[in-house]
Amino acid sequence: MATYDQDWCDSLASAVGAGTGEQAPMRLLFVITDTEDGKVAFHLDLDKGGIVSAIHGRVPRGQDKANVTVTVKESVIRELWAGERTRDAAFMRGDLKIEGSYERWLDELVPLFTAEPWSSAWAAS
């Protein structure tokens, strides 16, 4: 299985599951650079802290664009998911780029991604 392909997206969605929190719906796009396949992307539609859909690739034309876009090298995202590096440190060094609603990233996504079941799903990726 290629990393970040549709099977990988499906596994992530299954590991995180449906949401039960209070987070408003949003679309999140990850662009991961420097992978063995070059630049890859996947986008997540989130609601209530869970995954509604996880799709390999960029958001198709004609659909609502992402509320937040995260661009990061694969080595950095792996360190973040393993807990070996903090998101703040990666952001301040320029290794993690956030476009769109930085407020939603900071207020909603960072706390969400460090809580269960997200933290376990990222660690297993």
Image (cartoon, rainbow, N blue to C red):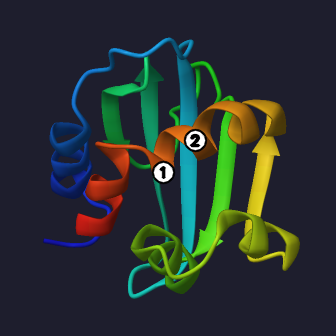
Q: Do the residues bearing badges 2 and 1 touch, measured as CB atoms within 8 Å?
A: yes
- SS for tag 2? helix
| Drawn side of residue 112 relative to residue 117, left or right | right
Three-letter amino acid code at the position of disc 2: Pro
Q: In which quarter of the image is residue 73?
A: bottom right
What residue does disc 2 label? 111
Is 103 located above or below residue 123 in the figure?
A: above
Is 41 located above or below residue 50 in the figure?
A: below
Tally of numbered discs: 2
Q: x, y percentage for residue 33? A: 57, 76
Q: x, y percentage for residue 87? A: 67, 65
- SS for tag 1? helix
Residue found at x 44% / y 27%: 45
Q: x, y percentage for residue 52? A: 32, 22
| Drawn side of residue 105 relative to residue 117, left or right | right
Q: x, y percentage for residue 17? A: 21, 30
Q: Quadrant of residue 26?
A: top right
Mark identifier at residue 114: 1
Which class describes the residues within 10 Å of circle 2: few (<14), some (14-19), or many (20+)?
few
Q: Is residue 125 visible?
A: no
Q: Is residue 59 visible?
A: yes
